[in-house]
Image: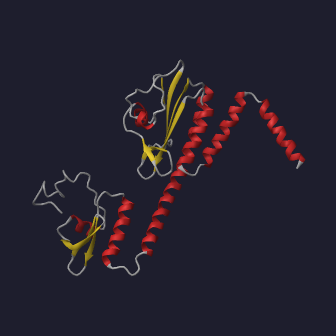
Amino acid sequence: MAEQVLERGRSNYDFLLRRPSAILETQFEASILLVGAATSPLELRLAVTSALHTALPDLVCSLVLLLDVETQQLAYFETNDSPLYMPTSGVVWDSVRRRSADTLAEAIPSSDPIRTLYPALPPSLGDGQVVVVLPVLPVKGHQIVAVMLAVCSKLQPPHEGKLQWLKKNVLVASQRVMKNAVAEKERRRAEGMLRVCGDLIDLDSSILLLKIHKHLKSILDAKASMVLIVDEVTNELICQTFDDVALDTPFTLPMAETLYGRCVESGQNILIDNVAEDMRYNPAVDTVNSMY
């Protein structure tokens, strides 16, 4: 026990005798370990932010954006479940779109949309200050997994070396965190389905369909939806629920003449980018050949 206390005292003594640069180096290495240990988007953002504070000279502020696996958009994670998405315009977005690391000698304009996401960005730069934008993506890939933005003093070779080291660790950690996020998403969906299945015992068909409908709507994050049942006797589609409401009088649709019937017969999803302009599916555009 006495030897452990003595060893701890020596470690603290050595730490106090180190130069500030050596202390920062130790703090940076500790931050890299935190990046590698992160298991969620929030943990990773906080770890990368800490690493930037020890890697860059006279850091004024920093912003870390990570890829949201559900939307495939870059986002700022205040919590794991409430990301704020990066605007797709402005100076920072231009760097992201080019997938290039940029060092800007001028402050980000006051009208830039990125300021709505991160108001802490300074309105102007001091003497010798720059804005660093560093997208993180695989060497042979095109999907950006993270973006690091910082306002600091002009970078020197040692700082650039630390940034490259941090970039490599963020790349590996981001890929692991994204896999964890996908696994967590599937786990939640499975739990939701189990809860639904547990409530299905002794229910009539309308209530049963309504529960399934609400669950599917939450999974798809749909603004409006309906559930259709295939009647194998009449070869029709029956709708008993529409937008979370059980219909008093169900209505039917012919299988062969509808878009929904085509989906059932082909067994494939049908995605329509713009219903208002697609002549195949909008009766208002084409009243002869369109499919309801």
**Viewer can see residue 104:** yes
Name the quadrant containing residue 249: bottom left
Query: Which residue occupies the extreme right position in the image?
Result: 2
Q: Nearer the viewer, residue 207 or 148?
A: 207
Looking at the image, which residue is at 31% across and 78% down? 205
Q: Nearer the viewer, residue 13 or 37?
A: 13
Residue 282 in the image: x percent, y percent?
Answer: 17, 57
Residue 127 in the image: x percent, y percent?
Answer: 53, 18
Residue 8 in the image: x percent, y percent?
Answer: 82, 42
Left or right, 65 with respect to 87, comes to: right
Name the quadrant containing residue 57: top right
Left or right, 262 with respect to 173, comes to: left
Q: Nearer the viewer, residue 264 or 201?
A: 201
Looking at the image, which residue is at 50% across and 45% down? 78
Count the numbered circles shown.
0
Looking at the image, which residue is at 63% across and 45% down? 34
Looking at the image, which residue is at 40% across and 33% down? 94
User: In which quadrant of the rendered image does the C terminus lie?
Assistant: bottom left
Is 255 located above or below residue 233 in the figure?
above
Query: Which residue occupies the extreme top position in the image?
Result: 127
**Viewer can see residue 172:** no
Query: Which residue occupies the extreme left position in the image?
Result: 288
